[in-house]
Image (cartoon, rainbow, N blue to C red):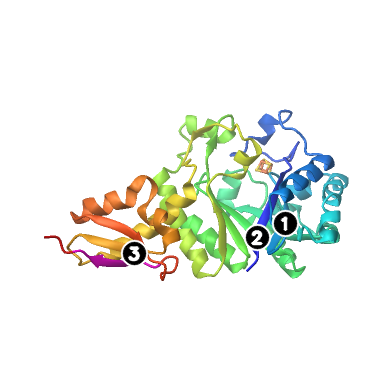
Amino acid sequence: MQRKYNIPIFVPHRGCPFDCVFCDQNRITGQIKETSPEDVTRIIEEYLKTLPREGVSVEAAFFGGSFTGIPIEEQNALMERVRPYIRSGRIDGIRLSTRPDYINDEILDNLKRYGVTTIELGAQSMCEEVLKNSNRGHSAVQTERAAGLIKNRGFSLGLQMMTGLPGDTPERSVHTAERIIALRPECVRIYPTLTIAGTYLEKMYREGRYRPQTLDEAVSLAKRLLLMFEAADIKVIRMGLQPTDEINENASVAAGPFHSAFGELVEGEIYYDMMKKALEGCGEDAVIFVAPSEISKAVGNKRRNILRLCRETGHRIAVKGDKEMAKREVRAIAVKTA
Ligand code: SF4
């Protein structure tokens, strides 16, 4: 199987006319260094040196803003730099992220010409009230329309959703996930909302008009969503951190469920549930077997799962690897103590 790699090229959307409440772009305009066509070549060259030449699939990934919202000549100048690598077979295509209302037939025609293969849309929510409260400036219907156009043209579709936006609830996030699943994207990203210093969301938070999710709430909801997407055979390629953090690496989080290993926490929770079930009725010290590559997720961040299970069962619990076992498989064996 080919290993997939993205070469990340950040193209901050300078002068974005929108003002999403969670985004600090407009506040840091002028501090962001523009990405030039020369930068694209340099980044690709540097990255390719680190990748194997055989058995890999590589995409140049324009992330960090709404790519199709920047002037068309600039889009083309950036994508033009990828062309030689696509011709020589070193890069297989281009992926980019953009807004649902920055997609139409003409835009897609242009992207096709330059070898774009994957388009990710920042859907964020499929609940109109949440979109409105977040000042997104587009509707859920626009996301559905854009997703349809993208798929009909044969592009691979990615959708990004956020949880914990103003007015959002776990049920509304589940509703968003259901509508996203109905659009049949190839991949999804889940970003719990962070309150970045200097944003309108921070003002709402300080004035008591917005309550951020706690880390536990965000993890528990992301777990529910991850299982929904997996059951629908849709890959979740990222959980945690929101796009604006990637734009501004120095962004300071004023509040919200920030954790540098958020995805691991979510996976850990899934293992916790499975291990708890496997231990039901055991009533003794036990060893839990999982695939060797899954041990750290099963043990949990800072041994969180083991400590909880020991406390809850009153017994000693250990986790061991078993090469014969698959991902998300759990087997508990009681250990008789003298
Ligand atoms: S999230 Fe995207 S669309 Fe919204 S203000 Fe920031 S850059 Fe603009």
Q: Nearer the viewer, mark 1 or mark 3?
A: 3
Please, what is the three-letter code of the amino acid marked with disc 2? Lys
* Quadrant in the rendering for residue 65: top right
Q: Is residue 229 left or right of residue 82?
A: left
Q: Using the numbered discs, state the Cα–Cα distance from disc 2 to disc 1 in whole angstroms.
A: 8 Å
Report if residue 20 is visible in the image: no
| Residue at point 38%, 66% (across, down) | 322
Q: Which residues are magenta?
A: 329-335
The residue carrying mark 1 is 59
The residue carrying mark 2 is 4
Specify few, some or many for label 1: CA neighbours under 10 Å numbering under 14, 14-19, or 20 or more. Answer: many
SS at mark 3 in the image: strand
Question: Does 269 lie within the magenta span?
Answer: no
Please, what is the three-letter code of the amino acid marked with disc 3? Phe
Which quarter of the rendering shows the C terminus? bottom left
Q: Is residue 248 left or right of residue 279?
A: right
The residue carrying mark 3 is 289
Please, what is the three-letter code of the amino acid marked with disc 1? Glu
Check residue 299 in the rendering and tell me which mark sits there, or answer none.
none
| Residue at point 44%, 53% (across, down) | 266
Q: Is residue 109 left or right of residue 6?
A: right
Q: Using the numbered discs, state the Cα–Cα distance from disc 2 to disc 3 in whole angstroms.
A: 29 Å
Q: Is residue 275 above or below residue 6?
A: below
Q: Are marks 2 and 1 in contact (CB under 8 Å)?
A: yes
**Picture coordinates of residue 81, whole percent (x, y):** 84, 49
